[in-house]
Structures are given as C-alpha cells and as structure tokens.
Amino acid sequence: MGQLDGLVAAKLAQRKEQGTFRSLTTSTSLSTGSEGQVDFTSNDYLGFARSEELKRRISEAEKQFSEVGVGSTGSRLLTGNSTLAEQVEKQVAAFHHAETALIFNSGYDANVGLYSSLGRVVKYIVYDELIHASVHDGMRLSRAELKPFRHNDVESLRSVLSELHGAAVVAVESVYSMDGDLAPLKELVAVCTEFNADIIVDEAHAVGLFGEGRGRVSELGLENEVYARLVTFSKALGCHGAAVLCNDNLRQFLVNHARSLIFSTFTSNHSLISVKCAYDMLSCIDFNKLNISYLIDLFNQSIKEVSDVRVIGGESPILGVIVPGNAEVRAVAAAMQNDGFDVRPIVSPTVPKGTERIRICLHEFNTEAEVKGLIVSLQNAMAHVF
Ligand SMILES: Cc1ncc(COP(=O)(O)O)c(C=O)c1O
C-alpha cells in the first residue's frame, strides 16, 4: 500500500479534532423516523415518501407501464431516453406553468449542469451568499467570474450588478434550505430587470408547499420573469430526481452542454413512474385543508414563550433554533433525540460560527401534541446545556 490510506486517516482525525466529523445514521422505519423517533428532520414535508396511497399508485402504474424496462440503460443522449421520460417532463412542465422541463438524476446534478454550462456563456454568475452547495460546485466548474451578494439583500444585489460590464446570471433559492427564510423574489426580479440580468430560482424547498404546490415563482406570477427554475422531486414529492423548468432554447442548450446530464446514465423507469404518480397525487391536494401551515403557526407562537431562544425562518416548514457552539448544539440535539424527537444539529462550518442550530422540519403528518412536546424537550435541553 502507498501513502494514501494514512493521508485519508489523518484528514478524518483532523475532522474529529475540529468537531466536524460526519457519520451515517440509519432510519429504521419511515413512519416513525430514526430509531422510532418522531421525524422533525427529513425533507418529506407532505409525507409522500411514506404515503401508502403513493405506493399503491406506483404499483398500479408499474403494471400500466409493464413494457418499459427497469433501468434506462444509458445516457439520455444515447439509449436512456424514452416516451415515458418525455411524458413525465410534459406533465412536470404543465404543472409548474413552464414551457418545458428537463429531468436530471438529482437536484445536485441539475445545479452542477446548469451553472457549469451557463457559466461558460455569461461573464458573471452573481449568487446569494447562502446558495446551496450544488450551485457552488457548478459555479466552480464554470469559467464565469463569481460575485456573491448579501443574503436576501436586494440593495446588495443592486450594488453588485451596477458594477458589472457583461452578461450576468443571478442564482437564488426561493426558500433557503438552512435558514428556511423566503427570498424577496419580486424585488430581486425587478433589480435583475433593471440591470438586464437573468435570474434562476432554485425551488427545491418550495415545491409542494407554496403556490398550490407549484412553488413560489408561480405563487407570485413570476413564471415569465425568471429565466429558469429548479424543482426537485426529492423533498415534498417524496421521490428522487429534479427538473430544470425553462424555455426550449435553454433545454436544448443543456442537452448539448450540461455534462452531468450527458455523461451519466439517465434515471430509472421506476423513478420516472414514481415522479409521475407523485405529481398526479400533488394535483389532487386541497391545499386549504393541509395541516402544515397550522403547525408552523403553532411552532412560531409556542417558541415565543421559551425565553432566550433565537429562531430563524418561520415562514416555511424549515425552522432553526440557534444554539451557538458545535459541542453545545450537539448536546441539545442529543438530549432531544433522547426524548424521542429526531432533530439534527447543524454545526459550523456548514453554517457560520455562532449560528450553529437545531434544524427543525415540520411535516403534514406531525401532530399538535408532537410539536408541543418538541418545544418542551427543547426548553429542557437548553436549560440542561447552558
Ligand atoms: C436548495 C437545494 N438545491 C438543490 C438540492 C439538491 O437536490 P437533490 O437532493 O435532489 O440532489 C438541495 C438538497 O439538499 C437543496 O436544498
């Protein structure tokens, strides 16, 4: 053996020393969360990933599509394309009021493909400082100049754009995955229009929750003002994969230039069928009858009664309770897990030092009693640790 394994071990030891070591945990059952705990952490906002109805719909549809094979057998450009894939893309585009959709194997792949390829035709990529890691990885593969602006700060975007001389694309999320706050999309779009820049909106955490499931861009009627949107099937839809919603021009460009699409075997047919069924189910939801907004309000009201806690988010099911310090946030999470609540600590450097947090995701299937119990548990854990 060469030196590599020693170097790998040293890197791991460094992480342990810094308190940033990551390890895998196993969820034993979806209906109960990790090891029987109540799920306050997964992205399964609507409970689709554990839905018996969705499972039933998928097995029925598998019979209907019995002529399709298991795997797609190749890249989309070689043998991987199918009428099923094109049918699902049409369904996704129609649902989100978009001209076309192009499916990628994951949201990560979609962002990497999108920014790495577009970043070779624009001079600048301007991005919100809290944009998702997948956008960062795509940007790094591009040749564009990268310009951050302050999180959700319209004036900061204006000031960055005012200094550029050349084509720019602006990258934002509509609901931020770590802070759970909402981007001021209308204002951001207006500034982009003023400076002749194009904006792309990542709706990973908005799909299924805002705009009758269509996302915040649709909710605000901005479909024609944004250049492209990313929707993922992996969060509220309970499946896997993602789509870029765009015009036919960009779709063709991505088919020609997005390397994460070109050089990867396309998603399985089972996955496509699952996405089709999840969208069928999403279209049937009566959003006025959902419980999740009530649970968000309940959490926001109840947490106010807990002294000395700082909460971020509050407008979406993603909420963060700030517990400064990696060791401290881990201790609070461990105590809450001990009480039966599956919550995870988010440590630095994933989030800036001093803003370490317990990230809480509320779900349609959580109950009022569970949310109240979670807050009592948090209060006790904080009192114990501080
Ligand atoms: C904002 C955002 N974009 C993209 C992704 C990647 O999506 P996927 O999990 O489908 O790869 C995520 C998931 O963590 C996300 O939070």
Image (cartoon, rainbow, N blue to C red):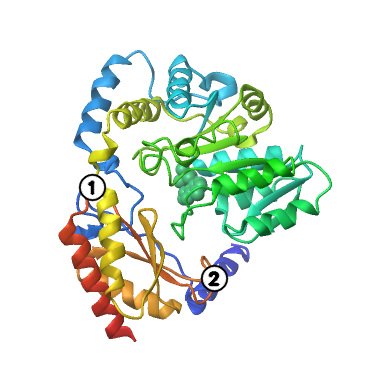
| Disc number lying in front (1 or 2) | 1
Q: Sequence order check: which comes first, mark 1 or mark 2? A: 1
| Disc 1 packing (10 Å; few <14; some 14–19; many ≥20) | some
Left or right, 362 with respect to 153, comes to left
Does 263 sit above or below residue 320? above
Q: Nearer the viewer, residue 281 or 300?
A: 300
Left or right: residue 357 compared with residue 167: left
**Is 315 located above or below residue 200 in the figure?**
below
Circle 2 crowding by C-alpha within 10 Å: few under 14, some 14–19, many from 20: few
Quarter of the image for the C terminus: give it.
bottom left
Give the CA separation, mark 1 to mark 2.
32 Å
On the rendered image, what quadrant is the N terminus found in? bottom right
Residue of label 2: 352
Tell me the number on the disc at residue 348.
none
Q: Residue at x 62, y 52 (%)?
A: 136
Q: Is the residue 282 above or below the residue 86 in the image? A: below
Q: Secondary structure at mark 1?
A: loop
User: What residue is shown at x 24% (from left), y 69% (from top)?
Assistant: 375
Measuring 28% from the left and 54% from the top, which residue is drawn there?
27
Q: Amino acid at mark 1?
A: Asn
